[in-house]
Image (cartoon, rainbow, N blue to C red):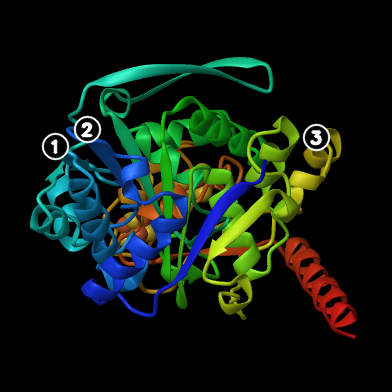
Amino acid sequence: MNTKVSLQKCESYDKQEVADSIKALLEPLGSMSAFVKKNDIVLIKPNMLSCKEPERAATTHPSVIEAVVRECFDAGASEVWVGDSPPAIFGRTEDFWNKTGFAKATETAGGKMLCFEKDEKANVNFKVFGKEVTASVIKKVFDADVVISLSKMKTHNLTRITGAVKNHFGFIPGFAKALWHKKFTKVNEFSAFVTELARSLPVKLHIMDGIEAMDLQGPASGRVKKNNILIASESPVAVDMGFCKIVGLKPESVPIMKYCKSIGWGPASFNDVDFVGTKVEDCIVKGYIVPPAPPVYLIPDFVLELIRKMIWTGPNLKPNKCVKCGRCKNICPAKAIEISSNGAEFDRTKCISCFCCMEVCPIEAIEMKASPLMSIILKLRNVRNILSRSKKNE
Ligand code: SF4
Ligand code: SF4
């Protein structure tokens, strides 16, 4: 049986419009009452990646949070908790809650903010390419009767998109996330890790906020792109399939989607999805730019070792922006950053291109840089994509 993916156009973050749109979005899936029952305790996990205002589009918008909390109470929930724990939180939880608008939205709707870093932890065990892995996640993900994910539609330099499947990474609190980047340095390994983690967690409903999305270099400092869309499904893979469909991306070009297909988790292609709600053709977005897959993903290990020095993407400091706060140094899992009198300095021989530093920099002083050879490869790939698109349009 095909998986249902509900699409709903929504043109702004006006609270009433969002509330009506969330209701309409969930209606084809059986409404919120299909997921939340009387007296249930609900945990909602939005994306709180950066300590930034909602209009920067790095985080799930508070209007969406407020509407979903209200829907849960209307369906009979007795308590609704909202929380997330980005890598850069470093004891600044309340600053994040306030700047992103999460605290006000949650409290206005009658919910409670949950500090993931202070919450009890529980271990989850799974295998990644045959290796046993134990990850420590917040215990409330198992204590709650219902868990709802509220992801943000964004791009990512490592995984290309960061959507519903990757939103589960935030159940691992704070800095520990960076250490998993170090353990699984290659994009295919990291994608497998995130997917297996997602498969181990009992999240029932997945909603994506793509009203104002983020593209280009994402996920904390890309371009705000108005996509005017909300997506929902019982399957995170199906939500990401909807993301791909709307922005014109081939699912098999996204490492997480490719891994999901290889293990048979979720819909394998657009043919395995039933789009309901707003017609797909009315939701299509033009000009949403996704970073190319790191070509290292396509190259065998032994060749990679030989050419690693010539082909790389990594962080680079923008001139005169760094305020030497040291957050990038603290988060770097590879200990590849030193702060000198000129600001952050990156050791390319140690860097694993996880881009955690870029995610945590509070003033967007870090950009992605490609080596000269990599730049040529990326340009050639762009030309090839343009040619194949124009061929399709003939
Ligand atoms: S320098 Fe940045 S991209 Fe490189 S390993 Fe450290 S945090 Fe990751
Ligand atoms: S690059 Fe950003 S995070 Fe790193 S020290 Fe400079 S301002 Fe701080």
Residue at 19%, 50% in the rendered image: 74
- Mark 2: amino acid: Asp
Residue at 33%, 79% in the rendered image: 12
Between discs 1 and 3, the one toward the N terminus: 1
**Where in the figure is residue 81, as x and y percent of width and height?**
19, 40
Q: Secondary structure at mark 1?
A: loop
Residue at 54%, 18% in the rendered image: 126
Q: Are marks 2 and 1 in contact (CB under 8 Å)?
A: yes
Residue at 29%, 75% in the rendered image: 17
Mark 1 neighbour class, 10 Å CA radius: few under 14, some 14 to 19, many 20 or more: some
Location of mark 2 (residue)? 40
Mark 3 beta carbon near ligand 1 (under 8 Å): no
Mark 2 neighbour class, 10 Å CA radius: few under 14, some 14 to 19, many 20 or more: some
Between residue 178 and residue 342, name the one nearer to us.
Answer: 178
Task: Please determine whether, in this image, residue 304 is positioned above or below residue 321.
Answer: above
Q: Give the number of the disc on residue 288.
A: none
Q: Quadrant of residue 259?
A: top right
Q: Give the number of the disc on residue 301.
A: 3
Q: Secondary structure at mark 3?
A: helix
Q: Nearer the viewer, mark 1 or mark 3?
A: 1
